Amino acid sequence: MDPFKKHTGIVTLLDLPNVDTDQIIPKQFLKRIERTGFGQFLFYDWRFLDGKKPNPEFEMNAERYRGASILVTRANFGCGSSREHAPWALLDYGFRCIIAPSFADIFYNNCFKNGILPVKLSESQVETIFQRVRMTPGYQMTVDLEKKIVGSDNDVAFGFEVDDFRRHCLLGGLDDIGLTLQYEGAIRAYETQHPEATPFPARP
Amino acid sequence: MRPKTMFEKIWEAHVVHEEASQPSLIYIDRHLVHEVTSPQAFEGLRLSGRRARRPDLTFATMDHNVPTTDRSLPIQDAISAQQMETLVRNCKEFGITLFDLRSPDQGIVHVIGPELGLTLPGLTLVCGDSHTSTHGACGTLAFGIGTSEVEHVLTTQCLLQDKPKTFLIEVNGRRPFGVEAKDIILSIIGRIGTDGGTGSVIEYAGETIRQLSMEERMTVCNMSIEGGARAGMIAPDEKTFDYLKGRRYVPADFDAAVERWKQLPTDLGARFDRVLRIDAASLAPQVTWGTNPGQVVPINARVPDPSDFSDPNARKSAERALDYMGLRAGTAMTDIPLDRVFIGSCTNARIEDLRRVARFVKGRRVAPNVYAMVVPGSQRVKKQAEEEGLDRILTAAGFDWRESGCSMCLGMNPDILKPGERCASTSNRNFEGRQGKGGRTHLVSPIMAAAAAVEGRFVDVRQYKLKD
Ligand code: SF4
């Protein structure tokens, strides 16, 4: 996983609450057995008409957002299915940071495992960003995980909260599995005492 | 000793390691795996040269992608077939028990867990699938995880988790005729919203919940995630023990296990972070009108007017939903005609669901404008239904009787809606395109779906009590 320290990029908008992971990556694309290549299918049913032509009514498709790497959206982003294909698709498309008033739990968690930083700001802060972005084509922001600040030069700057442990892992690009394996002794000790961890009765 | 909630008891019994300001390392007792969210996890294991730590605690099936037509025919979709073959290969390589398409135990992962006695009170259970909350009906702490976490559990049999908050939902009072478990959970989601449970584990309690059968409890817990919760649970009781007794993977010394399980229910006086009380007597059969499960009304209501919502986001969502659903504000729910009816999914495709549907449609016919299908939750459910003759009642009434799998709950296999088709579905998600691009899904209980199939439109099932 790539570490995330500080990132500057063009901001794009998705002006809808409760965007579910079925929309982020529709099920017909879940059949791949790799982690990569999902970006082309991101928001597929919204982004494309007839699966080919870019939908001109989908805000993200506008030329001014080309190359965007920060997505700003509304509350409860990423609800629904636990599919990690959703953050894979966002990352593969080029997003490193998603800003919203709130996120669904599993999605929020999945982002950190893939080097994407989900930033929670208040409804009014998100609204301010929406307005700035719409006013200024090519609007860029900088997300600084070390300082826990997201802002734009001489414009807005918002502090945000993030769990220390998750921040630490993302800053270092650390992999959870490696961390957990350090506790092998504790896991083994637990298994010897825990009744449910003993093998099943003889199977028929 | 301080009184504890059931969740706290299970959580504390599973902490392997804890440190201030870090997520806890908790032990996972059962890990269920399916074909869609696992290939990348196994690949990760392979790339790092690791093995599965506890293949004996890991069980796999194929459900999301599987065809629900004749199993003796080859699978048409080459990519689906590849995903299933990949699972077969991975299970073999890592020594994991797999219930494949030929197995009499195959089925939707959340249906077969309890069926096989893999889901037990007091255990932690995870699966790379959000509806893992279903298993909480047995007093299990069960939640969905992402693929990276699937790899984490395969490798370490543990997960790093922040301790969730607790949320008590107490339902008391007599459930009126026609109000099913599905209606209880849909009205809860309508009340708390699709993010009302975010960060929490819900415990459902109260006399109405106690009176639900095990399968009805599974329906309730299943949709906890639709209210944003990590998990939903119900305290184990005699019904739970009776349900589990004799199942394949239950502990050999079952009586001793029951004694342990009896210690699990929440202590009197234990504190929850949030409490919601609901009067079952006030509930009516529910139908969703929008594109998330919280956009729901009683059957005798009308499609809401977006301008009735004071919250601007809710208003915008409602406008968009009505547009997608092709509905006009003010239309009576009972005036909405249907093209399709789907009875299936991990919410409502167990034997009791099929029995209720069969009892209702016996001697009736599916309306000529409707194509209706029944997809049993598992091969066991299918076999049991056939032994009871339910399949013959259903097919005589004009239903299509299929093989088990997720099917049109998410339409990864060929069972999908065409654009614009409107479906009464017993599944759990009515998201845009969930059952097929442009498809319009209304979530209902099995009995509401059966009645809708017969009438060709939504009907208030309570009216049949007067007629019959
Ligand atoms: S039946 Fe539907 S909700 Fe349940 S596991 Fe399958 S796809 Fe998911």
Image (cartoon, grey):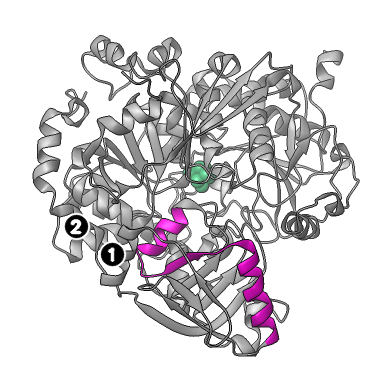
In the picture, measured across the screen, residue B227 lies left or right of residue B244, that is right
In the picture, measured across the screen, residue B146 lies left or right of residue B92, that is right
Query: Does mark 1 fall on the same chain as mark 2?
Result: yes
Residue on which the image places disc 1: A169
Q: Secondary structure at mark 2?
A: helix
Part of the protein shown in magenta: A106-135
In the picture, measured across the screen, residue A50 lies left or right of residue B236, that is right
**Amino acid type at image mark 2:** Leu
Residue A42 seen in the current view: yes
In the picture, measured across the screen, residue B101 lies left or right of residue B280, that is left
> Is residue A51 within the magenta segment?
no
Instruction: Give above or below for A79 relative to B185.
Output: below
Beta carbon at label 2 within 8 Å of ligand 1: no
Q: Quadrant of residue B265?
A: top left
Gap in Å between the C-alphas at discs 2 and 1?
10 Å
Identify the residue at image location x=27%, y=55%.
Answer: B151
Residue closer to the observer: A76 or B121: A76
Say which quadrant the C terminus of chain A sits in: top left
